[in-house]
């Protein structure tokens, strides 16, 4: 299942036929007029945004190792109004963040945002296009490129430009719009282009004109039924980023792998890997059609992801981490596949986004009151483990004072529950280990803890 895709930016149902320089000028004008995202200066990033902007999430995903962000150099390319740059600075204590954007108005706002939150000394900003990154004369441990790659005339060249300023062990996070999930918006953009609404930088007039057209259509007109609601007219940012988006294009998973090959980079993982699990699409994972079960055993990751997006095109973004080929240590066994003895010399860390007073209090309350702990109250992932039983919650309490060896967690579990609740016999080490291993396996899968072999 490989892509036969020489051009790499293959599809386009979309209206971009402007020459690259012209296109770049249009993109700059669009974001100078309205820096993105339009989020009030005092708004703080929500926990899931901090989670995915934590370099620890990315490096653990690649290397099964926990890194210290302090001293790291992070680049936020296409930083826009700086909401993500702020998330990078907060989620990675001690790291320095450089925000770069083509649009001076966006850079200005981003700088104000970080200053407003007292993060000015952690961040630097430059007005610079992605193609000019080498001018910075610096190399980065982590590069964030959010909501930008799909706008570029040659996304593989853009990835290569980021690769050129990435340290040998570094990681890039970038994303592409999904051709499948967004197909209706691409049709709408084509209509806007046919009507001349994308000839210049769209503004109020174009929003009104496009809204007049859609309001006038019958409600059962297929495109209207699938994309339109009467409030769109009032939501300029939504209109600009969907119906009237300049240069927007859609891609597929095979396109992504072709681009990575052309840029000499290697796929690490989807950033929301929990939501790309092909097996989760089946009613009964133990009862797959035989030909499929055999095929999946042999399939590459790229093929499984491609199949996922064809079957279930739910994600707007193909949002991924990549790095230089052979960067990091990929020679490790996933925790799901560990044998009991693999747990013996391991260290368990709580994800930094769960290292909060609220989570500690909720966990302790669950352990004491016998109530389930709802993880969605703390890190709301649609695919995460929703609840943790009271007995299990107590097993995690020692992690608030710092990482613990698996052995220490087992010992703490035996002290807090010295007897088997059914037989009342003293709790043996094996009885204490089994539930802890189960909980940690599920928590690693959901991304709530890191378990790493001792160095
Ligand atoms: C959709 S916004 C994303 C902003 C931010 N990364 C976020 O996700 O919140 C895209 C940003 O990329 C910038 N941009 C587009 N093409 C660029 C390029 N070639 N070099 C640098 N910045 C670019 C735009 O000016 C805009 O601020």
Image (cartoon, rainbow, N blue to C red):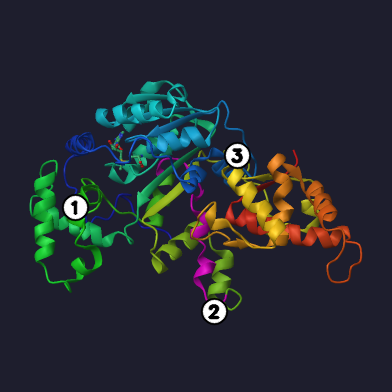
274 part of magenta stretch:
yes
Position of residue 444 measured from the top left corner of the image (x, y, whole percent): 63, 53
Q: Looking at the rendering, which quadrant does residue 25 occupy?
A: top left
Position of residue 446 measured from the top left corner of the image (x, y, whole percent): 58, 56
Q: Nearer the viewer, residue 110 or 334?
A: 110
Q: Relative to residue 219, is residue 279 drawn left or right?
A: right
Q: Nearer the viewer, residue 113 or 164?
A: 113
Q: Nearer the viewer, residue 36 or 344?
A: 36
Position of residue 332 measured from the top left corner of the image (x, y, whole percent): 67, 49
59 part of magenta stretch:
no
Distance of mark 2 from mark 1, alpha carbons? 48 Å
Q: Residues within 10 Å of mark 3 (few under 14, many from 20)?
A: some
Residue numbers of the magenta segment: 262-284
Q: What residue sits right under mark 3 in the picture?
A: 328
**In terms of sequence position, does the residue under pointer 2 or pointer 3 come before the other?**
2
Q: Residues within 10 Å of mark 1 (few under 14, many from 20)?
A: few
Q: Which quadrant: the N terminus? A: bottom left
At x 69%, y 43%, the residue is: 400
Task: Determine the quadrant in which ligand 1 lies.
Answer: top left
| Residue lying farthest to the front in this orientation | 369
Q: What residue sits right under mark 1 in the picture?
A: 234
Distance of mark 3 from mark 1, alpha carbons? 48 Å
Q: Is residue 1 visible?
A: no
Vertical side of 102 occupied by 38: above or below: below
**In terms of sequence position, does the residue under pointer 2 or pointer 1 come before the other?**
1
**In terms of sequence position, does the residue under pointer 3 or pointer 1 come before the other?**
1
Q: What residue sits right under mark 2 in the picture?
A: 289
């Amino acid at each position: 299942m490989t892509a036969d895709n020489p051009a790499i930016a293959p599809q386009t149902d979309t209206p971009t036929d402007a020459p690259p320089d012209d296109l770049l000028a249009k993109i700059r004008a669009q974001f100078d007029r309205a820096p993105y995202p339009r989020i009030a200066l005092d708004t703080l990033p929500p926990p899931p945004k901090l989670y995915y902007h934590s370099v620890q999430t990315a490096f653990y995903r690649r290397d099964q190792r926990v890194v210290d962000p302090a001293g790291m150099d992070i680049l936020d390319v296409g930083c826009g109004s700086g909401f993500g740059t702020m998330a990078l600075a907060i989620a990675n204590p001690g790291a320095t963040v450089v925000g770069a954007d083509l649009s001076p108005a966006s850079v200005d706002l981003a700088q104000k945002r970080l200053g407003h939150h007292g993060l000015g000394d952690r961040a630097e900003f430059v007005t610079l296009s992605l193609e000019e990154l080498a001018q910075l004369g610096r190399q980065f441990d982590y590069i964030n490129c959010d909501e930008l790659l799909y706008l570029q005339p040659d996304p593989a060249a853009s990835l290569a430009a980021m690769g050129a300023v990435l340290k040998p062990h570094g990681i890039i996070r970038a994303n592409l719009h999904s051709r499948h999930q967004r197909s209706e918006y691409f049709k709408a953009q084509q209509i806007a282009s046919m009507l001349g609404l994308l000839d210049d930088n769209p503004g109020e007039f174009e929003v009104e004109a496009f809204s007049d057209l859609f309001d006038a259509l019958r409600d059962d007109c297929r495109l209207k039924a699938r994309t339109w609601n009467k409030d769109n007219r009032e939501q300029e940012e939504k209109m600009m980023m969907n119906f009237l988006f300049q240069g927007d294009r859609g891609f597929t998973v095979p396109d992504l792998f072709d681009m990575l090959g052309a840029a000499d980079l290697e796929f690490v993982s989807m950033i929301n890997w929990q939501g790309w699990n092909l097996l989760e699409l089946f009613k009964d994972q133990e009862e797959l059609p035989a030909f499929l079960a055999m095929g999946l055993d042999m399939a590459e990751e790229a093929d499984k992801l491609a199949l996922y997006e064809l079957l279930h095109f739910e994600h707007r973004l193909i949002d991924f981490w990549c790095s230089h080929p052979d960067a990091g240590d990929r020679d490790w066994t996933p925790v799901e596949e560990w044998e009991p003895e693999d747990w013996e010399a391991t260290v368990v860390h709580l994800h930094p986004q769960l290292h909060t007073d609220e989570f500690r209090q909720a966990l302790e309350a669950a352990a004491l009151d016998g109530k389930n702990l709802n993880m969605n109250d703390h890190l709301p992932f649609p695919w995460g483990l929703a609840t943790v039983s009271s007995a299990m919650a107590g097993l995690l309490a020692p992690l608030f004072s710092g990482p613990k060896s698996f052995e220490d967690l087992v010992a703490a579990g035996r002290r807090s529950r010295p007897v088997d609740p059914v037989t009342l016999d003293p709790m043996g080490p094996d009885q204490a280990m089994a539930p802890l291993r189960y909980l940690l396996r599920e928590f690693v899968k959901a991304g709530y803890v890191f378990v790493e072999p001792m160095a």
